[in-house]
Amino acid sequence: MSAKARQKREAGSARSSVVVARWYQGARPSRTQVVARYSGLARVAAAGGAPVDTPDEQEIDGCGGAVYAGSAAELRVPEGALRASMACGNPVAIAELFPGDRVLDLGSGGGLDVLLSARRVSPGGFVIGVDASPDMIDLARVHAAESGVTNVDFRLGYLEAIPLPDAAVDVVISNCVFTLSTDKPRALAEAARVLRPGGRFGITDVLAEPGLDPDRRAAAEHATGCPVGTLTADEYHELLLAAGFAAATITRTHPIIGGLYSAIVRATTPAPATPGRPDPR
């Protein structure tokens, strides 16, 4: 790493740690606190820093831009988009995306997964990124302009109130964001609502081992930047079915810390596709 890059990273880490300290005072953060935190991290990234989503600025194996197999040049994305990633997996690698698909990325952050998906659904496809942080939306738009990708749109909105009509998209992806929702049942129901019949839900998220001591689980959630609360696989599966999904599967990928692990969550909405789907554009 060059001296200039190191200085940028250190400056970004210093600013990021202030945001972290503010969020980790108290118990479960509110949605307003979550949005404020990620807006601060977006500003760190926009200034050339490398945001780290843990309270002690400790990078965790299996998280961040390292989960993507390749450099920014190899992935054909701006360096800033990869550096801004706070991922626990790569949903684009596991999602079934085809040319012409309409894709929604929930919690799109700096836009990395939107940009990667946009190339896979061309020609004819379109990708929408939704994020609750205005700073993240601005950052993602900058990265989209730098990449030259035009079949994308970024919209301000919440997981619990997605700004799209019913049955608007073929695929929903997300990268370790549902764990940050303060109302997970409603967030999953919203994802099901905007998917067309027979639509695909393919995300990565942080889950908890069953039977963890509550104090140990809370400590691990705070250590990984997931203080809103994680779900076990059984709890996740139950919520997916209650939200209207069918054929849900959860596949463990790698451990994170303290009984938490990253997983691939897949599901579909019932019934075959029907004609006349609304265009989200």
Image: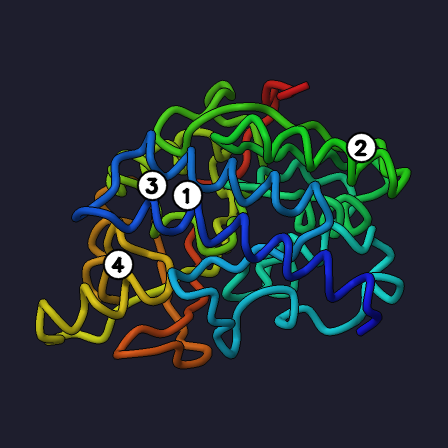
Query: Pointer 4 and pointer 1: residues touching (CB < 8 Å)?
Result: no
Task: Tell me which label, 2 or 1, sits earlier in the chain.
Answer: 2
Residue nearest the observer in this picture, 124 or 10 = 10
Q: CA distance from mark 4 to mark 1?
A: 23 Å
Task: Quickly name the residue at label 2.
Answer: 151
Mark 4 surroundings within 10 Å by alpha-carbon count, few (fewer than 14), some (14 through 19), many (20 or more)? many
Q: Quadrant of residue 190?
A: top left
Q: CA distance from mark 3 to mark 1?
A: 12 Å
Image location of residue 195, percent across then percent down: 48, 35
Q: CA distance from mark 2 to mark 4?
A: 33 Å
Residue nearest the observer in this picture, 246 or 118 = 118
Instruction: Reply above or below: 199 against 213.
Output: above
Q: Mark 2: which amino acid?
A: Asn
Residue in the picture at 42% in, 34% down: 35
Q: Is residue 79 left or right of residue 197?
A: right
Mark 1 surroundings within 10 Å by alpha-carbon count, few (fewer than 14), some (14 through 19), many (20 or more)? many
Task: Tell me which label, 2 or 4, sits earlier in the chain.
Answer: 2
What is the total number of numbered labels drawn onto the structure image? 4
Task: Tell me which label, 4 or 3, sits earlier in the chain.
Answer: 3
SS label for mark 2: loop
Q: Mark 1: which amino acid?
A: Thr
Task: Quickly name the residue at label 1.
Answer: 269
- The circle on residue 230 is 4
Task: Quickly name the residue at label 3.
Answer: 188
From the viewer's perspective, is the residue at label 2 or at label 1 nearer?
2
Residue nearest the observer in this picture, 172 or 7 = 7
Q: Quadrant of residue 32?
A: top left
